[in-house]
């Protein structure tokens, strides 16, 4: 039987987010005004270009720090490459990751690489956050307005690209989205007094939204007509370009929610499937009080970034699509 380690009184007091309530990253309080955020994420190539893969993997890993309301400090690279892989390609992967971390205001401070038949790359990221401003999945408050900081559809588009079916414009839009940091979203959410947030990645929009509902005990109602999708994503979905991960996510979500997943009769089935498709380096899903919603929209406009107000937080712990 797997047993949890016995924590010292000091560790138990300062470990603000850990395995006890699984979240996007761990958070450990160092002092009254400083907590460290720690996460790790890596995956095989999602695009052909080596620099872009490294940069997207880095943005994806750092997104977990932003999902906790933090800022990136430094990172360690985690990688595995075939022994015969061209060293120039490997160097480009590392360069892409390092330049994306630098864009976040951090630095690659080291790492570890092993020989592996399937290439993999990612980061172990350390960030910082004020202990009173940590965002968690369980922080939803009934009556709050819901925001999503990036359009959906990267999973559908990259799957179609592997099938040779994605238009160049679709893939370019997906790459641009995956490369965009959630740094602005985290800052705006913190400044708006948000308490609940997560980033949309491997479990898809509904999977991560469902985790927030389970963790907070509050529900989510999503206006599907307000959801932003990347160019060509819906057409590619209607053509059947879904990954194997979408089917696994569907089973996971149906097991997690069952009857608590409420889908209005007029919501297209293809939209539901797209919301179950895995995303890479997706946006932040966060909630703020209704009187702060206008300030959130204005802050994103001032930063030159788009954001979508997509619904509200409910009292009953359901996941509702309307």
Image: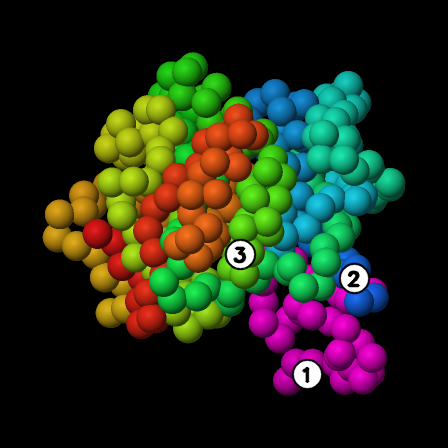
Magenta region:
1-30
Circle 2 SS class: loop
Q: Position of residue 77 (x, y in %)?
A: 78, 41
Viewer-nearest residue: 179 or 49: 179
The reply to whether residue 127 is in sight is yes
Circle 1 SS class: loop
Find residue 33 and name its label.
2
Seen as rendered, the residue at the extreme right is 109
The reply to whether residue 80 is in sight is no
Q: Position of residue 138 (x, y in %)?
A: 51, 67
> Which quarter of the figure is the N terminus placed in?
bottom right
Viewer-nearest residue: 292 or 37: 292
> Residue 142's quadrant in the figure?
bottom left
- Disc 3 vs disc 1: which is toward the camera? 3
> Residue 154's quadrant in the figure?
top left
* Residue that mark 1 sits on: 3
Seen as rendered, the residue at the extreme front is 291
Give the distance between the C-alpha atoms of the residues marked 2 and 1, in whole angstroms. 32 Å
Please name the residue shown 30% across and 57% down the image: 221
Q: Is residue 8 magenta?
A: yes
Give the distance between the C-alpha atoms of the residues marked 3 and 1, in whole angstroms. 34 Å
Q: Are marks 3 and 1 in contact (CB under 8 Å)?
A: no
Q: Position of residue 193 (x, y in %)?
A: 55, 56
* Residue that mark 3 sits on: 194
Q: Is residue 269 magenta?
A: no
Q: Residues within 10 Å of mark 1 (few under 14, many from 20)?
A: few
Circle 3 SS class: loop
Find residue 199 and name its label.
none
Q: Earlier in the sequence, mark 2 or mark 3?
A: 2
> Residue 289's quadrant in the figure?
bottom left
């Amino acid at each position: 039987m797997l047993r949890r380690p016995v924590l010292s009184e000091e560790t138990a007091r300062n470990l603000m987010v850990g395995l006890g309530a699984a979240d996007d990253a761990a958070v450990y309080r160092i002092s009254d005004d400083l907590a460290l955020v720690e996460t790790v994420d890596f995956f095989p190539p999602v695009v052909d270009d080596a620099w872009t893969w490294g940069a997207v993997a880095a943005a994806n890993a750092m997104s977990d720090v932003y999902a906790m309301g933090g800022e990136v400090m430094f990172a360690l690279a985690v990688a595995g490459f075939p022994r015969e892989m061209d060293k120039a390609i490997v160097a480009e992967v590392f360069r892409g990751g390092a330049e994306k971390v630098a864009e976040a205001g951090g630095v690659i401070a080291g790492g570890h690489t092993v020989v592996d038949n399937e290439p993999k790359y990612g980061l172990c990221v350390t960030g910082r956050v004020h202990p009173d401003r940590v965002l968690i999945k369980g922080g939803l408050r009934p009556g709050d307005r819901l925001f999503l900081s990036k359009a959906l559809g990267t999973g559908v588009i990259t799957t179609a690209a592997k099938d040779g079916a994605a238009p160049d414009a679709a893939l370019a839009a997906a790459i641009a989205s995956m490369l965009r940091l959630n740094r602005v979203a985290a800052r705006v959410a913190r400044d708006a007094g948000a308490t609940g947030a997560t980033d949309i990645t491997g479990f898809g929009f509904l999977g991560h939204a469902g985790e927030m509902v389970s963790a907070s005990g509050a529900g989510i109602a999503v206006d599907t007509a307000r959801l932003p999708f990347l160019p060509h994503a819906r057409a590619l979905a209607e053509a059947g370009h879904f990954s194997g991960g979408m089917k696994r996510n569907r089973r996971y979500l149906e097991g997690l929610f069952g009857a608590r997943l409420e889908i209005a009769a007029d919501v297209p089935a293809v939209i539901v499937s797209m919301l179950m498709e895995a995303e890479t380096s997706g946006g932040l899903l966060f909630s703020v009080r209704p009187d702060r919603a206008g300030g959130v929209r204005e802050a994103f406009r001032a930063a030159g970034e788009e954001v979508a107000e997509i619904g509200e937080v409910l009292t009953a712990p359901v996941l509702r699509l309307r």
